[in-house]
Amino acid sequence: MTCRRGSFGAYRGSGDARPWSSNSPRTRALDRFLDHYNTRRGHSALEGRPPSRLAA
């Protein structure tokens, strides 16, 4: 199976997906995405605030 490059999360179907050259850059990109998704992006259940704002 080939790992496809693109945004992690919802597939936009824009045709920009390309195979990763190796697993290392794919893992780094996924780590960055998960950090943003889980700590920085606004959540509708939190009135648009990221979860990190609640840890005060």
Image: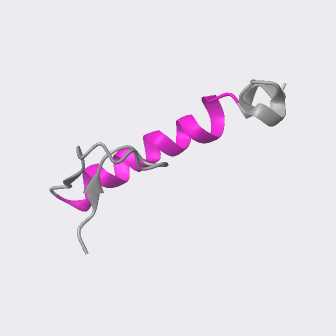
Is residue 45 or residue 14 the one in the foreground?
14
Bounds of the magenta segment? 22-42
Residue 37's x, y, as percent?
A: 58, 39
Q: Please tell me whether the stretch drawn in magenta is mainly helix, strand or loop.
A: helix
Residue at the spot 72% in from the left edge and 33% down from the top edge: 43
In the rendered image, which quarter is residue 27 located in? bottom left
Residue 31's x, y, as percent?
A: 45, 47
Residue at the spot 39% in from the left edge and 44% down from the top edge: 12
How many marks do you count on the picture? 0
- Please say whether residue 40 is one of the residues in the magenta stretch: yes
Residue 27 visible at all: yes
Residue at the spot 48% in from the left edge and 48% down from the top edge: 10
Residue 19's x, y, as percent?
A: 19, 57
Q: Which quarter of the rendering shows the C terminus?
A: top right
Q: Is residue 21 above or below residue 53?
A: below
Residue 55 visible at all: no
Lateral position of residue 41 relative to residue 18, left or right: right
In the rendered image, which quarter is residue 51 located in? top right
Lateral position of residue 35 relative to residue 29, left or right: right
Q: Is residue 2 above or below residue 14?
A: below
Lateral position of residue 47 relative to residue 23, left or right: right
- Please say whether residue 43 is one of the residues in the magenta stretch: no
Residue 1's x, y, as percent?
A: 25, 75
Q: Quick one: which residue is furthest to the bottom in this view?
A: 1
